[in-house]
Image (tube, rainbow, N blue to C red):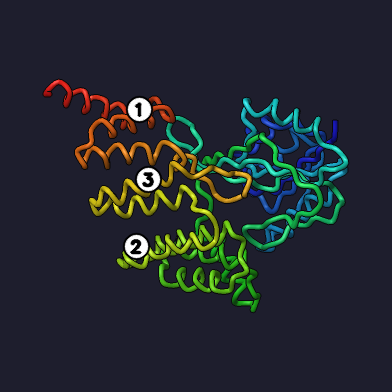
Amino acid sequence: MSAISLCMIVRDEEDVLERCLSSVADLVDEIIIVDTGSQDRTREIARKFTDHVLEFPWVDDFAAARNFSFSQATCEYSMWLDADDVIDPPEREKFLALKESLGPGVDVVMLPYYTGFDSQGQVTFSYYRERIVRTGAGMLWKGAVHEVIETRGGVVYGGCGVSHRKQKPSDPDRNLRIFEKMLAQGTQLDPRQQFYYGRELYYHRRWQEALKVLRRFLRQGKGWVENNIEACRQCACCWYALGREERALGALLSSFAYDCPRAEVCCDIGQHFFDRALWEQAAYWYERALACERRDGLGGFVQPEAYGFLPSIQLCVCYSRLGRQEEAERYNERAAVYQPDSPAVAYNREYFASLRSKA
């Protein structure tokens, strides 16, 4: 079984660090904690799990801090987690099986990252991240913010998911502040950084600026296909916010130039027509969403609901509004396959039962 060094950077994480380390301590072979300036009990908690607690001055550069943490690893593989990440009990056996499978041909392990959850704890948003890399193979972190490892060699996709479970909100302005500092210093943003800078502007409701950055990113034609598709969706959101609905729809449709349609985009287009009570058009696009293959391994952002429950429950409404109640009821039952305890499914069942009782 290959040995893994867990390398983490932390700062003021006393609320979540023990939960994180408790979930993974017996799965890894070495734990390295790099503190970037905590003022709370973070270092004290870390020392319950490891003697390798180091300090690194924060310089507004996540890649610099992560590269320092990885430089301390002594095991065959290096792995990263954030302090508010956990490996939940159902994933532990998958992780151990993964360790058993690591061998000479494996240089990078991509694992699912679960970052959104509904009230029942079901995953609503996920994507793959480069989680484990071969130590000393020259793979470095890149990017002061929204950092990424420049991977090479043999890449495998594992099934052990890491859950990102925040206890408190992080500084909402930090990432934008770092980007704007870089620009003020004359730094040229690479395509990936341009994409994330545009997203940060969108999150801050700076619609026009976000559109300018994201559209320039798309025009340059150097972005990763998944980021291109997501940029189209972000542009659409900005256009909606500015009251330019026709431009928003055009931005969504333009995503098809980059690859086969994603269910997320089809649902966005379906919602466009749904909101305007154009039931036939809405149903068409929700049907297209159901026909889309979910391909997590492509690495893009995935909203699992878009590949089953969401289009099914929306089709139920569309066909009911069109007077096609039998079809509507079938789609409600299809939605129930994905979310048996959904209040919307239960409400619709009562509605259809009432229609039958009046017949």
Q: Amino acid at mark 2?
A: Tyr
Q: Nearer the viewer, residue 190 or 296?
A: 296
Judging by the rendered image, the residue that carries numbered circle 3 is 286
* Amino acid type, mark 1: Glu
Q: Earlier in the sequence, mark 1 or mark 3?
A: 3
Numbered disc 2: secondary structure = helix
- Mark 1: few, some, or many residues within 10 Å (few <14, many ≥20)? some
- Circle 2 Cα neighbour tier, 10 Å, few/some/many (<14 / 14–19 / ≥20): some
Left or right relative to 303: residue 137: right
Q: Amino acid at mark 3?
A: Tyr
Image quadrant containing the N terminus = top right
Q: Residue at x 24, y 54 (%)?
A: 276
Residue 334 lies, with reference to residue 144, above or below; the image says: above
Q: Which mark is residue 240?
A: 2
Where residue 221 appears, as percent x and y from the top left, is 59, 70
41 or 89: nearer the viewer: 89
Residue at (41, 29) in percent of width and height: 339
Tell me where residue 269 appears, x and y as whole percent. 37, 54
Q: Outermost residue toward the left?
A: 358
* Closer to the camera in the image, 73 or 281: 281
How many angstroms separate mark 1 from mark 3 (CA)?
16 Å
Residue ID at (32%, 55%): 272
Taking the image as shown, residue 202 lies to the left or right of residue 80, namely: left
Where does label 1 land, which residue? Answer: 333
Q: Helix or strand or loop: what does disc 3 sit on?
A: helix
The answer to which of marks 2 and 1 sits earlier in the sequence is: 2
Q: Residue at x 66, y 34 (%)?
A: 160
Q: Position of residue 92 (x, y in %)?
A: 68, 27
Residue 14 x, y percent position in the rendering? 62, 40
Look at the numbered disc 1 and give the secondary structure of its residue: helix
Residue mark closest to the camera, 2 vs 1: 1
